Amino acid sequence: MKEPDEHTACLRAGEMPTPQLFHSGKKIGIVENGKVVLGSQSFRPEGHVPPDGTEVIIRLLNGPGAVRIAFESKAEREAYDAWLNAEWERRRREEQAERERRIEEASIERERIVADLNERVPFRWTTGIRVVLSGVLEHSHLTGTNRRSVNHIATLEDIECGRLRRKAQEFLCSTDPGRMWGHVDDEERKGCPTCPKCMEIVERLIMNPKLVVHRKDEDEPAGPAP
């Protein structure tokens, strides 16, 4: 929808604009006999003249060499504003629906990744975070943690595979829990791993015949993974 056309009118020589124009708020005039009338003052439009009886919104302009007013159809402005508000609301709903769709897709994908790992990983595992203090720097949550933090894979059993050795509650990518402390989730409430290094390591371990898992409830290791 096109924005309403704005027209102008010039004050007659030596005429002062009505005091109403200097106050805030919309000034509503009307077109009568080809002129714009506001209270006791009338203005002769320059160029196109809306039909007689048209209500117009008026504002004061300071033109070069003359004092002028600008005016537009009140009905057209109200219709345009209503359309604009409806358009903004439509776009807001579309953007909200798109955000919700992406969130739902991301949730489904996270559940798929966790289910796939639960089926393939030959040892008990969960997720955790390594907290690195970041104060109130640009990328922090203002809580001392960095918003780029990722979910690591933490083994819940001692494992060995060649030179890789991890004890229960340690992350696959590193045994360092962080500068201050690390957090490991409950096995039943594990999240979706997002650490690229942990994901790379777990994929190597899944099919590695040298992987040995030391079960918590057994005295002897479980032996190489199948």
Image (cartoon, rainbow, N blue to C red):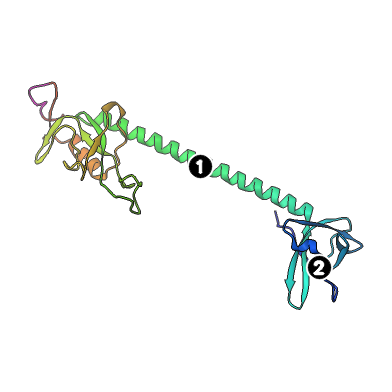
Mark 2 packing: few (<14 Cα in 10 Å), some, or many (20+)? Answer: some
Instruction: Give the CA separation, mark 2 to mark 1.
Output: 51 Å
Q: Is residue 12 magenta?
A: no
What secondary structure characterizes most of the magenta part?
loop
Which disc is residue 98 wearing? 1
Where residue 41 sits, quadrant-wise, is bottom right
Mark 1 packing: few (<14 Cα in 10 Å), some, or many (20+)? Answer: few
Where does residue 212 sit, x and y in percent of width and height? 11, 31
Task: Report the amino acid beneath label 2.
Answer: Pro
- Which residue appears at 66% of the width and 45% of the height? 86
User: Relative to 88, does residue 218 appear above or below in the rendering?
Assistant: above
Which disc is residue 182 wearing? none
Could you say whether the residue bearing mark 1 is in a helix, strand or loop?
Answer: helix
Left-right relation of 198 to 115: left
Left-right relation of 119 to 94: left
Quadrant that contains the C terminus: top left
Where does residue 11 sit, x and y in percent of width and height? 83, 71
Residue range corresponding to the magenta coloring: 218-223
Foreground: disc 2 or disc 1: 2
Could you say whether the residue bearing mark 2 is in a helix, strand or loop?
Answer: loop
Left-right relation of 164 to 53: left
Q: Nearer the viewer, residue 190 or 144?
A: 144
Which disc is residue 17 wearing? 2
User: Relative to 22, does residue 191 appear above or below in the rendering?
Assistant: above
- Which residue appears at 19% of the width and 42% of the height? 173
Left-right relation of 188 to 10: left
- Which residue appears at 74% of the width and 50% of the height? 79
Q: Are marks 2 and 1 in contact (CB under 8 Å)?
A: no
Q: Earlier in the sequence, mark 2 or mark 1?
A: 2
Q: Nearer the viewer, residue 44 or 158?
A: 44
Task: Report the amino acid beneath label 1.
Answer: Glu
